[in-house]
Image (cartoon, helix red, strand yellow):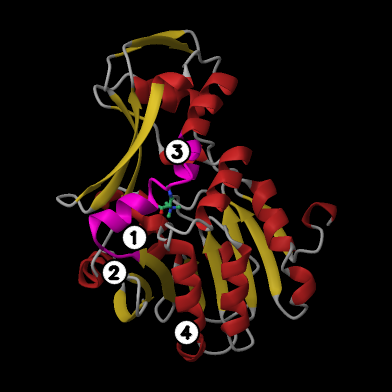
């Protein structure tokens, strides 16, 4: 039909849209102010994130791409022919192209994203180069369950592809729940291929999340601008600085906007105060050990089969079976 364009299907599962206004007001009312990191990714934020992926200090993206190149023959053998590939939060088309090109006559690719427009457009870009692939898009929130048997999928082994160490953004209980949700999409014999960043020296991590050219700081300041624009906010960006630090006890990089002076501001008609050096927690990026992540995956019902680690930069890709 017209709505699906070149796609075999586009299905809108109408995810309940999270509420920027409610989440920001609730987050700013907490003793430790916090805003969920998913709100970074408006149009400008997505463009800044793309800049981050090319920074010399931000090793994540280029390391994962290099590792994917190295392991392609093994992934091809593990997946076998006619795989049905599903990507929750369909992000970088570079990575999904790499995976599809590595596979042996894959049967289908389904991109899923909370933004229907975004996923439809990004998945459609693959169509011209892959005439034999059934390509579909689903508007869906990947933290929610889905009955994949209700989609017009070909037979074949399902492989969920979740790259980029996005799992690291979640608190550990939420990461476990997300893995359980993904496990619930799959049947015996299916697999999850997931990128997971590993622990490394704090100095390397702090440089990666507070880069010299200030792109990660811009990424955070964009959140202030988004609040001012969309929620009639009166925050003064010049009253904040950006800080990232490695917390070895919780094995995560924590990111904050820090008030440089006492301030008062409004958001959506609500009044807030901040004291000098008080913070807004904007993001966590958890770093794992291979064993630690495998244990988490096992608790979610996966059998860890293979973990590949980049030879120079600690970063892992896991093949987990059901
Ligand atoms: C998209 C969550 C994987 O944690 O490395 C990068 C986000 N934030 N720099 C990460 C991010 C600041 C990124 N993830």
Q: What residue is pinned by disc 1?
A: 180
* Cα–Cα span, label 1 and label 4: 29 Å
First along the sequence among labels 1 and 2: 1
Q: What residue is pinned by disc 3?
A: 217
Report crowding for label 3: few under 14, some 14 to 19, many 20 or more residues within 10 A (C-alpha).
many
Q: x, y (%) of residue 135?
A: 69, 69
First along the sequence among labels 1 and 4: 4
Q: Quadrant of the C terminus?
A: bottom left
Depth check, mark 3 against mark 2: the one in front is 3
Depth check, mark 3 against mark 4: the one in front is 3
* Cα–Cα span, label 1 and label 2: 7 Å
Q: Is residue 284 above or below residue 321?
A: above
* Cα–Cα span, label 3 and label 2: 38 Å
Q: Quadrant of residue 138?
A: bottom right
Q: What residue is pinned by disc 2?
A: 301
Q: Residue 7: in sight, yes or no?
A: yes
Q: Is residue 208 above or below residue 258?
A: below
Q: What residue is pinned by disc 4?
A: 70
First along the sequence among labels 1 and 3: 1
Report crowding for label 1: few under 14, some 14 to 19, many 20 or more residues within 10 A (C-alpha).
many
């Amino acid at each position: 039909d017209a709505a699906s364009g070149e796609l075999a299907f586009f299905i809108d599962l109408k995810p309940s849209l999270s509420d920027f206004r409610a989440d920001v007001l609730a987050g700013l009312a907490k003793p430790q102010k916090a805003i969920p990191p998913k709100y970074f990714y408006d149009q400008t934020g997505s463009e800044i994130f793309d800049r981050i992926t090319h920074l010399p200090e931000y090793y994540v993206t280029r390391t994962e791409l290099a590792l994917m190149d190295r392991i392609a023959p093994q992934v091809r053998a593990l997946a076998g022919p006619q795989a049905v590939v599903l990507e929750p939060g369909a992000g970088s088309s570079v990575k999904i192209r790499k995976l599809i090109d590595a596979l042996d006559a894959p049967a289908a690719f389904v991109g899923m994203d909370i933004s229907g427009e975004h996923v439809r457009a990004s998945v459609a870009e693959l169509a011209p180069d892959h005439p034999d692939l059934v390509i579909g898009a689903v508007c869906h929130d990947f933290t929610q369950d889905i009955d994949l048997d209700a989609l017009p999928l070909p037979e074949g082994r399902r492989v969920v592809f979740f790259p980029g160490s996005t799992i690291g953004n979640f608190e550990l209980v939420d990461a476990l729940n997300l893995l359980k949700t993904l496990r619930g999409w799959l049947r015996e014999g299916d697999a999850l291929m997931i990128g997971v960043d590993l622990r490394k020296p704090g100095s390397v991590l702090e440089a990666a999340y507070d880069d010299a050219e200030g792109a990660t700081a811009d990424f955070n300041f964009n959140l202030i601008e988004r609040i001012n624009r969309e929620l009639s906010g009166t925050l003064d960006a010049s009253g904040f600085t950006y800080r990232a630090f490695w917390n070895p006890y919780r094995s995560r990089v924590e990111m904050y906007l820090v008030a440089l002076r006492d301030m008062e501001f409004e958001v959506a008609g609500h009044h807030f105060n901040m004291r000098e050096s008080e913070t807004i927690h904007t993001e966590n990026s958890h770093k794992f050990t291979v064993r630690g992540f495998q244990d988490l995956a096992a608790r979610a019902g996966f059998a860890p089969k293979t973990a590949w680690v980049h030879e120079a930069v600690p970063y892992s890709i896991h093949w987990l079976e059901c």
